[in-house]
Amino acid sequence: MADQQAPSARPTAADPTASDPTTVAPASAEPATAHRTTTVEKGRFTAAHCTCGWRGPARRARSKARTDGTEHEASP
């Protein structure tokens, strides 16, 4: 694997915004306050975690942890 090089940090032609500092990247479709949840497994338990810092209770059923996360995303 000695012939492979690590990717450089320099901008490339594939990234048009890298060479032009006046170009603004398009805004995402979701507002900045949107909640994004994932499930995290630890041992026999699964819990939903959110980007806002919220963490659901540990559950043995993955489906219940996913439901906790979905309900959290739906709440204001």
Image (tube, rainbow, N blue to C red):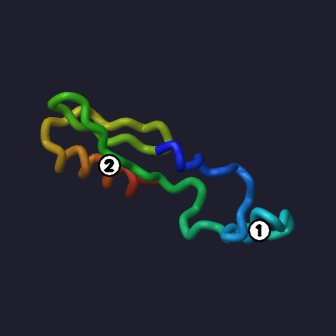
Q: Residue at x 15, y 31 (%)?
A: 44
Q: Are marks 1 and 2 in contact (CB under 8 Å)?
A: no
Callout 2, which amino acid? Gly
- Which residue is tagged 2? 69
The residue carrying pointer 2 sits among few (fewer than 14), some (14 to 19) or many (20 or more) residues within 10 Å by Cα, namely many
Numbered disc 1: secondary structure: loop
**Is 59 rendered above or below residue 70?**
above
Numbered disc 2: secondary structure: helix
Distance between the Cα atoms at labels 1 and 2?
Answer: 33 Å
Q: In the image shown, does 31 or 22 lie closer to the viewer?
A: 22
The label on residue 60 is none
Q: Residue at x 19, y 28 (%)?
A: 43
Seen from this angle, which residue lies furthest top?
43
Residue 31: name its quadrant: bottom right
- Which residue is tagged 1? 24
Q: Is residue 10 left or right of residue 32?
A: right
